[in-house]
Image (cartoon, grey):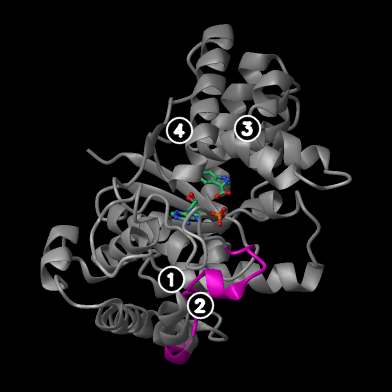
Amino acid sequence: MSYRVFSGIQPTGQITLGNYLGALRQFVALQQDADAFYCVVDLHAITVAQDPSLLRERIVDLATLYLAVGLNPQKSTLFVQSDVSAHSELGWILQCMVHMGELSRMTQFKEKAEGKDTVTAGLFTYPALMAADILLYQTSRVPVGDDQKQHLELTRDIALRFNSRFGETFAVPEVMMLKEGARIMSLDDPAKKMSKSNPNPQSRIEILDSPDDIRKKISRAVTDSDREIRFAPQTKPAVSNLLVIYSLTADVTIDSLVAQYEGKGYGAFKKDLADVIVAHLTPIQEKHREIRGSGLTEDVLRQGAATAAQEAEETMALVRERVGLGGFRRR
Ligand code: AMP
Ligand code: TRP
């Protein structure tokens, strides 16, 4: 039986190897069995200031990458969040179901607000919009990286609260996370997650980085004090992170890598790791170049928006009726 999957990525920068290994690659694997909806969440992006023309460019770029990594529009629905107004509509309704205290506990909000003079109300209520994204599609599974776990738990709580107050309306979604790779760390600091918004570009590999840049970044990646290649996330976080990246990219086990590099230095290990990443990303980059400017992405997004809007409207009709809202407009 097919099950519903939903996930989204913000168009706020170049997609990193962390996004890819932690989330995007799962999207592709899931489309075989699942009825999947993958969204470019531009309404989430504007919780912090964005340049309008750059935002539009990044939306198309991210959707093009969805196609380049292997998402098939015949199997999955690919669309842009703001093209389906039900996201904003349900987002508002769910803001009226979630508590200030719950939102205040969100670590992503605390991290993004830290050190800022002002933050938008949207940044604070962001998890209600994310819950709307997921619940609109009666989603049963949400593939994400580890940093989204808390948001997913809140989504579940909101769904359960709504269902118990108004009657069964939403499917209660489950989070899907990798055992290793749900949190790829920065190359310059293994205590921080690899992030597209880190000011230091050396901290991350971007999916569209040139082979030369990838080799440089990997060769400069920090390592731990001894020379041993071992998997020990607590005591050797930097090398362990590189092992996870290697293992996922090359599809080999960490144990076999540890055996393969026993007695060899970091130099050989890093050189091979860079080669493996380059080999994995080159075909994706070629596909991305091929699709860009062909008009395919725009066509896929137009079709995706129509499919998503129709699906979302079914849930919205039920939500309006349950909550006691409006209902006079013919749709
Ligand atoms: P974002 O870049 O915040 O829109 O994240 C998009 C997806 O990538 C989400 O599912 C995140 O959990 C996931 N993700 C982001 N950074 C990482 C990382 N360093 N390691 C693993 N997954 C990540
Ligand atoms: N909050 C997620 C992030 O920062 C992006 C996101 C928005 C999302 N809506 C979603 C992820 C719905 C999964 C499902 O990465």
Q: Secondary structure at mark 1?
A: helix
**Residue 299 shows in the view:** no
Q: Nearer the viewer, residue 171 or 308?
A: 171
Q: Which residues are magenta?
A: 196-212
Cα gap from disc 3 to disc 2, whole angstroms: 38 Å
Cα gap from disc 3 to disc 1, whole angstroms: 32 Å
Of labels 3 and 4, the one closer to you:
3
Q: Compare marks 3 and 4 and give the one earlier in the sequence.
A: 3
Query: Are the residues flagged by discs 3 and 2 in contact, CB closer than 8 Å?
Result: no
Q: Is residue 170 above or below residue 289?
A: above
Residue 312 lies within the magenta run: no
Cα gap from disc 3 to disc 4, whole angstroms: 24 Å
Q: Nearer the viewer, residue 126 or 61?
A: 126
Pointer 2: what residue?
296
**Residue 13 shows in the view:** yes
Query: Are the residues flagged by discs 1 and 2 in contact, CB closer than 8 Å?
Result: yes
Kind of residue indicated by mark 4? Gln
Q: Compare marks 3 and 1 and give the one earlier in the sequence.
A: 1
Pointer 4: what residue?
138
